[in-house]
Image (cartoon, helix red, strand yellow):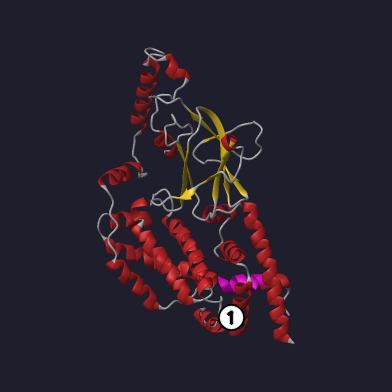
């Protein structure tokens, strides 16, 4: 069943059908939220906000837009809001949470030291660079899609991705050289 | 030791791995959704959605030819200029009285300005600042700042009283990006190099 058909079912009174959309998109979008926010608790909060807002806004959803893209746009915004709220509350990425994030990645794929390096390096990037890097290289969006999603211009986004790659490379090299010496 | 390029590739491969979330979080979300009020849709909006929903239509070639012929006959039979008001031909929008409707519905030309002005709107959910710039404010990005709509997610809007006539304008996002109005006619030529749009404002019809 297509997303649009499920939305129609929900709007026709079958509220439980929305759980199908939750199942369809939760894990897929959890990855972005976790990497963007750096820990699972905040990611869960952002995901919950995004799904709830989308649910309430379903009457305004236009079928000419893909539901997934519509929901993802809300999630990107919720991640920004959550990050701002957390910055007010506490310093980003307290040391205790790095291990938590590392543990959230499936085991047997990468060694834990590398994951920790990567998480730390990603956390150092400015939020807008981290967002652009994840959208481009991890979520595999085109620059045009990113521009539509974020409201930023294509050239600005290209610059953010370029800077993010350079900074990430430096940070990972530093970590790597420290780790190997 | 890994090469720099390899480090980014490796990072991307790692970041693309699925992330394991607490299954209880999803259950909590579903439980919260069950308690949330069901989204409701009004009969007018429901009817509009039904009408606007794209769907495949099965038409035989014979029916299509007959329909095309009927349209051609109607078009050719229509009297040209018969009964038309010359004023309305010259100023086709002079009779429009609802400037908001004309602008908000995506018409490239807005209608007559009223006391509340013309509504300009733009969907830009990721923007933090959206300015309306045009020849009516000397392209000053500080003069007409749009506000987030309280009823439409991601929509920015502003009402601006404009003098009757032709105006060229654009949106300026976050102090760095020009965006012409996606639902209006594009301005061609002129002194403005940035992509911009055109709006025609008619005389008040009252």
Among the 4 quarters of the image, the one containing residue B40: bottom left
- Judge by depth and name the residue closer to the eye, A127 or B135: B135
- Residue drawn 27% across the image and 62% down it: B37
- Judge by depth and name the residue closer to the eye, B95 or A34: B95
| Quadrant of the drawing holding the N terminus of chain B | bottom right
Q: Position of residue A88 (x, y in %)?
A: 52, 71
Q: Position of residue B36 (x, y in %)?
A: 29, 65
Horizontally, residue B31 falls left or right of residue B12, namely: left
Q: Position of residue B191 (x, y in %)?
A: 66, 33
Residue A108, compared with residue A17, is above or below; it is below
Residue A40, compared with residue A69, is above or below; it is below
Residue A76, compared with residue A87, is above or below; it is above
Q: Determine the secondary structure under disc 1.
A: loop
- Residue drawn 64% across the image and 31% down it: B189
Among the 4 quarters of the image, the one containing residue A120: bottom right
- Residue drawn 67% across the image and 66% down it: A165
Horizontally, residue A173 falls left or right of residue B46, namely: right
| Residues shaded magenta | B8-16
- Residue B193, magenta (yes or no): no
Give the chain of mark 1. Answer: A
- Judge by depth and name the residue closer to the eye, B76 or B112: B112
The residue that disc 1 covers is: A110
- Judge by depth and name the residue closer to the eye, B84 or B66: B84
Label 1 neighbourhood size at 10 Å, few (<14), some (14-19), many (20+)?
some
Residue A62, compared with residue B32, is above or below; it is above
State the residue lying farthest toward the bottom. Answer: A181
Among the 4 quarters of the image, the one containing residue B178: top right
Would you say the magenta stretch is mainly helix, strand or loop? helix
């Amino acid at each position: 069943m297509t997303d649009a058909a499920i939305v129609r079912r929900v709007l026709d009174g079958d509220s439980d059908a929305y759980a199908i959309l939750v199942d369809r998109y939760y894990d897929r979008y959890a990855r972005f939220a976790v990497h963007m926010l750096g820990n699972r608790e905040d990611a869960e909060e952002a995901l919950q906000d995004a799904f709830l807002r989308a649910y309430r806004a379903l009457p305004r959803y236009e079928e000419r837009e893909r539901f997934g893209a519509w929901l993802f746009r809300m999630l990107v915004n919720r991640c920004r809001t959550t990050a701002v709220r957390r910055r007010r509350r506490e310093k980003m990425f307290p040391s205790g949470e790095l291990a938590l994030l590392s543990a959230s990645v499936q085991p047997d794929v990468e060694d834990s030291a590398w994951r920790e390096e990567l998480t730390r390096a990603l956390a150092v990037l400015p939020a807008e660079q981290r967002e652009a890097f994840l959208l481009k290289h991890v979520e595999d969006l085109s620059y045009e899609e990113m521009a539509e999603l974020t409201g930023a211009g294509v050239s600005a986004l290209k610059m953010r991705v370029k800077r993010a790659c350079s900074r990430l490379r430096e940070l990972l090299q530093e970590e790597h050289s420290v780790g190997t010496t | 030791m890994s090469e720099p390029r390899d480090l980014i590739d490796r990072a991307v491969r790692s970041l693309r791995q699925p992330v394991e979330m607490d299954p209880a979080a999803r259950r909590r979300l579903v439980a919260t959704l069950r308690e949330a009020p069901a989204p409701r849709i009004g009969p007018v909006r429901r009817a509009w959605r039904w009408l606007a929903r794209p769907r495949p239509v099965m038409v035989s070639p014979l029916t299509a030819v007959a329909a095309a012929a009927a349209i051609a006959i109607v078009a050719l039979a229509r009297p040209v200029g018969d009964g038309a008001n010359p004023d309305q031909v010259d100023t086709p929008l002079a009779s429009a009285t609802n400037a908001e409707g004309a602008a908000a519905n995506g018409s490239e030309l807005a209608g007559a300005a009223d006391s509340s002005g013309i509504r300009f709107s733009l969907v830009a959910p990721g923007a933090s600042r959206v300015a309306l710039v045009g020849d009516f404010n000397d392209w000053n990005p500080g003069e007409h700042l749009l506000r987030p709509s309280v009823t439409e997610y991601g929509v920015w809007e502003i009402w601006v009283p404009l003098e009757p006539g032709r105006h060229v304008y654009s949106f300026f996002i976050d102090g760095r990006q020009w965006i012409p109005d996606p639902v209006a006619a594009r301005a061609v030529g002129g002194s403005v190099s940035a992509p911009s749009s055109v709006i025609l404002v008619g005389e008040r019809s009252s």
